Structure formats: C-alpha cells, structure tokens
Image (cartoon, grey):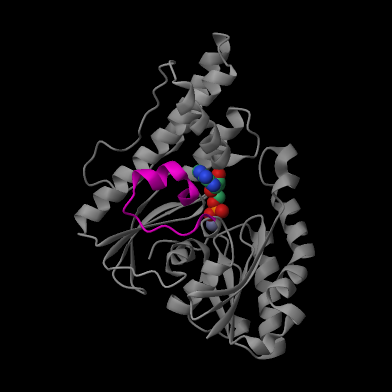
Amino acid sequence: MKILAIETSCDETAAAVVEDGLTVLSSVVASSHEMHEKYGGIVPEVAARKQLECIIPVISEALPGLNFKNVDAIAVTIGPGLIGSLLVGVETAKTIAYVTGKPIIPVNHVLAHMYANFIDSKKIEFPAISLVVSGGHTELYLMKNEKELTWLGGTLDDAAGECFDKAARLLGFGHGGGLAIQNAASQCQMLNAKWPIKLPRPMLDKKNELNFSFSGLKTAILREVNKLKELNQFSENTVLQLSYEVQEAITDVLVKKTIRAAQAFQAKSILLSGGVAANLRLREKLPSAIVPPIELCTDNAVYIAAYAYFRGQKKDWKTITALPDLSVEV
Ligand code: KG4
Ligand code: ZN
C-alpha cells in the first residue's frame, strides 16, 4: 500500500510517499526555521503563512504531477501542534481526499515519531520501550507489538528539546537548538574543561518514577549563565563548558529513565525517536537502542506514513479536524 503523508504540525511543511510503511519512495521537507531567527522562537502566524505558500509545491515534489492515482491513501497529522499550522495540512489533505475519493488516515504526531524506527524493515523485538523526545514532548511508551502502545510517563512541565532550545538561546546560539549545544559540547571535550559547572539531574531519586521534569534544569542553566556574567567569566570557553554540562544533564536523565523502564518491563529492545534522538551523545550513551537515521528524527512526513500503515484507521474526510491539544497518552 502506497501512502501519501502530509505533516505541518510545527514550522515544517513535509510530504512523503511510503510503500507498506517501510520503503521511502519520496520525502520533502521545507522549513521556515531561519524566518524565526530574529524573534528567538517560532512565531505561529509566520509559520502558518509560510506553510500555506509551501504546501502545494512540497506535495507536488513528493508526488510528481500530483498524480494521486499512484497512492492508495492520504495520511495527515491532525495534532498535537500549532492550530494554524495543523489546519494547512489537514484542510489540504481533506481536499485531496474529497476530490480523489481516496481514504484519509488521521495521525497523532507524537505517536508517529516512534514509527521512524520501522523504516527500512528494521527487526524490532517486542516488548519494546520507546522514548519519544522532541521539542514539545518527552514521553515513554511500552510497545507490546507494532500496534499496541501503553503510555508510561512523560514530562510534567518542559520537554527535553525545549530545555536544549532554551539553553541554546541563553548561551547565544540563537535558534540553533540542541544541534548548536551538541556542536559546542563536542568542542569542549577537546578543550579539557576546568570550570566546575554541575547542573542537576531532575527526578532521578524516586526509583519507580517514569515522569520527567526539565523546568528546574532550565532555571539552573539561567542561574549559571547569570553567575558567569556577574563574575565576568561568560567567555567562549565557559559557554562551551556549560553546553557540555547541559547535554550531559539532559541525556543522563533520558538514558536513566529509559533503562529503568526497560528493566521494569523486561523490554527486548529500546527505541529512540523525535528531534532530540538526533543527539549523538544520547545515541552514544544508549548504544543498544534502535535509532532512526538522523534525518528521520526531526519532523518529516515519512514516519507519518509509517504510523498510518501500521496503526492508522481510514476515516471519512468529513470527520477529520485539526486537534492542537490531541492527547499522547494511550
Ligand atoms: O521532533 P522535532 O523536529 O519537532 C517537534 O516535534 O518538536 O524536534 C525538535 C527538537 C528541538 O528542540 C531541537 O533543538 C531538538 O529537537 N534537536 C536536537 C538535536 N537536533 C534537533 N537536540 C539535541 N541534539 C540534536 N542534535
Ligand atoms: Zn516532532
């Protein structure tokens, strides 16, 4: 079965055609990242306007000639996400379904992230523990098989990616996010750091706790930055050292909780996904984990199609609406 998938939940406009949930026939991603640079964060209205301009060119690049005869169904992200952005993808998908008579498959963006691990027919043994870690979410799931999911825990406040993004802004890397922190941290190791910066590893004390909290860590980073500035020691070196410690603190928490869940449920495999799963240090600290290729960690439409294939349900286009607050607890 060939699925055309559309993803517009945040600031990306993406489309892909995937066969049987495993084989990528095309994938196109357009981002309005640079446009948000000067505002220090994503401006929903700017993102949605850009998506409106990009959606048809992106779909026609993924499906040349908009030849809908070549696909069997349309999958689309209906939430969670930014309402203006979601509406662009959802209304486009509904129009295609109406005009072509093809079925439409609504997709939960966060749950879909983990299906990036299924691409290219990776052999996954069940039960599996799946950590979805992105800009807006940090969630742990138990996967009994390709379809059956149980939510085990998530962040009580900020997501891990949000913490990376906030740290990047505080350290002067603008909208560079976790990738900027990762690059700075790798330079720091070469510098042989001397500044004794130690950040907290929140919520590791309770043994059975599978929830996360990153807002305290965000505040601790702000405190360190202010302290360094007051001491006139906010230099290139200390920025690199702080980047290193930020990455260590976030990845320590993610790794320990994931291993804790894997032990508790006697998991046979561990899956990582979401934008933060692109982090090389996280991947290094969990060498046995199954991880998607880097380009399938951050937002794209390939895993939207994979989710639709493995877990989606065909619906009448009239019943589909954008749901910005769609729950990720299953
Ligand atoms: O999954 P994603 O593209 O969008 C959401 O669904 O949120 O994730 C974006 C997040 C951002 O917070 C970004 O800073 C983070 O993924 N990210 C990384 C890396 N690449 C992207 N975080 C750490 N290390 C990276 N290499
Ligand atoms: Zn995402």
Along the viewing direction, whichever of 292 and 200 lies nearer the viewer: 292
Q: Magenta residues, as a range? A: 276-294
- Please provide percent x and percent y for residue 217: 43, 32
Question: Can you give x and y, in whole percent of width and height, for residue 329 in the image?
Answer: 39, 61
Q: Kindly indicate the quadrant of the structure image that contains residue 230.
A: top right
Q: Does residue 126 sit above or below 208 in this rendering?
A: below
At 42% from the left and 20% from the top, the residue drawn is 197
Q: Quadrant of residue 96?
A: bottom right
Indicate which quadrant contains ligand 2.
bottom right
State yes or no: residue 277 in magenta: yes
Image point 64% across, 63% down: which residue? 8
* Residue 282 counted in the magenta span: yes
Q: Position of residue 311 (x, y in %)?
A: 43, 76
Give the residue furthest to the top: 231
Left or right of 59, for residue 156 = left
Query: Residue 277: x and y, percent?
Result: 46, 51
Residue 16 appearing in the image: yes
Residue sitting at 77 percent across and 58 percent down? Answer: 49
Query: Taking the image as drawn, is residue 135 in sight?
Result: no
With respect to residue 136, does 60 lie above or below?
Answer: below
Image position of 265 with respect to 173: above or below: below
